Image (spheres, grey):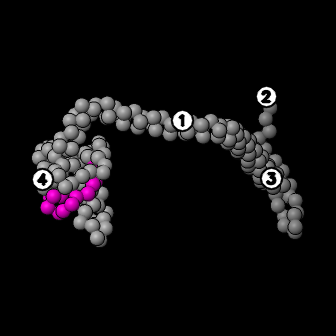
Amino acid sequence: MRANLLPRRNTHVTVFGTDINAGYLQQALLGAAIVAAIAILGNGIEMLRLHRYEAAANDTNGALLSRTALRAESKRLALDVARYQEIAREADDVRRSGPSAAVAIARIGNAVPAGVWLDSLTHGPTGYELSGESRSVDALSGAMLTLNRALPQRPATLVSIDTREAASDAFRFSARIGGGPTPAATQ
């Protein structure tokens, strides 16, 4: 086996008026070419990945757009289900409260004294709303006392009172039996 251990002879090249060692110039140009090739290869790989992500995003957007009608239909169905559930809850409340509500309504009707009459009596989940007229404030206060005794576990509250006509002695009123604060008190 033979090897030449003697250093190579230096050749010089003149570039733009500068004398440069040709071996060093060749190594620098080879290094720059390698760096450029790696940069181009890396850029190509990133562009390929970017195109793949864009294609996946376009596919996802297409799938979302194609299912717009299905999403709208499912939203409508969810609202229908919520409405039906509310109806079922109300029906269940009415079904469970039948006999006890009938007894309470009878007690309220029996507690209304002469000179006071009811126009409406509404049963809700929190209590009873009633409205009517009275010939005098004394009769109305007596009615409120007897309504308090009619359902002792649910206090009666006078919500509003006003004169119906200036020439008439009748007073219009609304009251609540049981439940939370009156709507007038919350406003």
Residue type indicated by callout 1: Leu
Residue type indicated by callout 4: Leu
Q: Secondary structure at mark 1?
A: helix
Q: Residue at x 41, y 36 (%)?
A: 87
Height in image: 14 above or below 125? below
Instruction: First in sequence, mark 1 or 4: give its number.
Output: 1
At label 2, counting other C-alpha atoms closer than 10 Å, the crowd grade (few under 14, some 14-19, many 20 or more) is few
Q: Residue at x 80, y 39 (%)?
A: 4
Instruction: First in sequence, mark 4 or 2: give its number.
Output: 2
On the picture, is 22 further left or further right than 71? Answer: right
The residue under label 1 is 77
Q: Which mark is residue 1?
A: 2
State the CA–CA distance, disc 1 to disc 4: 49 Å
In the rendered image, the quadrant that contains the N terminus is top right
- Can the viewer see residue 6? yes
Discs 3, 2 touching: Cβ within 8 Å: no
Mark 1 vs mark 3: give the one in front: 1
The front one of 4 and 146 is 146
Q: Residue 156, how many percent across, how many down?
A: 18, 51
**For residue 51, which quarter of the picture?**
top right
Q: Secondary structure at mark 4?
A: helix
Q: Residue at x 18, y 62 (%)?
A: 136
Instruction: First in sequence, mark 1 or 3: give its number.
Output: 3
Q: Residue 50, how many percent across, how many down?
A: 70, 45
Is residue 137 one of those drawn in magenta?
yes
Which range is magenta? 129-141
At label 3, counting other C-alpha atoms closer than 10 Å, the crowd grade (few under 14, some 14-19, many 20 or more) is few
The front one of 94 and 138 is 138
Q: Secondary structure at mark 2?
A: loop
The front one of 47 and 183 is 183
Q: Which mark is residue 29?
A: 3
Instruction: First in sequence, mark 4 or 3: give its number.
Output: 3
